[in-house]
Amino acid sequence: METKVKSKYEKGSEAYADVLTGDVDRKIANAPKNIPGWGIDADRENDPTYPMKNRTDADYERIHYEKAVQQPVTVEVFRSIERPAITRVFGASTPPRGLSGRIRQFAYRFSEADARHWLTLVMADRVDVVEGIIDDLKQGIIPNIFAERGWAAEFKYNRKAAVQKVAIGAAVGAALITVLLLRNNRKSKSSLPVA
């Protein structure tokens, strides 16, 4: 059974409204001082970076900064369920697409503390590689896998490991071909009429 972790920053909540208006920083600064470690860096005489840090007192005025302008959202942007809103700036050059995009969409249903989130994103990356190769082939481009995987450099600088990888790949490929041929041979023998 799948359970979705609810964030206190969900749409419509008070915390969500605070983020949209920029009041969240001020609320944190005015929060109760009974939190363990609260204000630990407030005493300038007890600062572990003294005397190396060049003090400008800007550290103590962070609450009054002006937020950057929000980048317009022109593509689908995924965000963690722990974040109240999307970041002010984000990458838009490669929007989610195809099966890998759907897998990423599924991954962002889970908390960043959940292994399902990260493992699903890793799987989406692998699927995206295959989708990229298929797109290249559709456009008539034959991918140079040898160069793209860095095998030339590995053969030049780490020849033993490169030869070992090629040998293992050849052995696995030969084993798969043998299994498929034996399976086809058995099927053809079993389909022959008995005399």
Image (cartoon, rainbow, N blue to C red):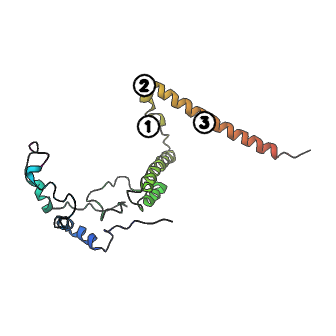
- What is the C-alpha distance between the residues marked 1 and 2? 15 Å
Q: Which residues are magenta?
A: 47-51
Q: Callout 3: few (<14), some (14-19), or many (20+) C-alpha neighbours within 10 Å? A: few
Identify the image quadrant of residue 189. Answer: top right
Instruction: Pick the residue in front: 133 or 22.
Output: 22
Give the quarter of the figure containing the C terminus.
top right
Q: Residue 148, labelled with which disc? A: 1
Residue type at tag 2: Lys
Numbered label tally: 3
* Residue 99 x, y percent position in the rendering: 49, 56
Reading the image, the residue beneath label 2 is: 156
For residue 143, side relative to residue 59 (left or right): right
Q: Which mark is residue 173?
A: 3
Amino acid bearing label 3: Gly
Q: Is residue 18 left or right of residue 180?
A: left
Q: Could you tell me which residue is drawn at 37 percent across and 68 percent down?
A: 6
For the residues labelled 2 and 3, the Cα–Cα distance comes to 24 Å
Element type where label 1 sits in the image: helix
Q: CA distance from mark 3 to mark 1?
A: 21 Å
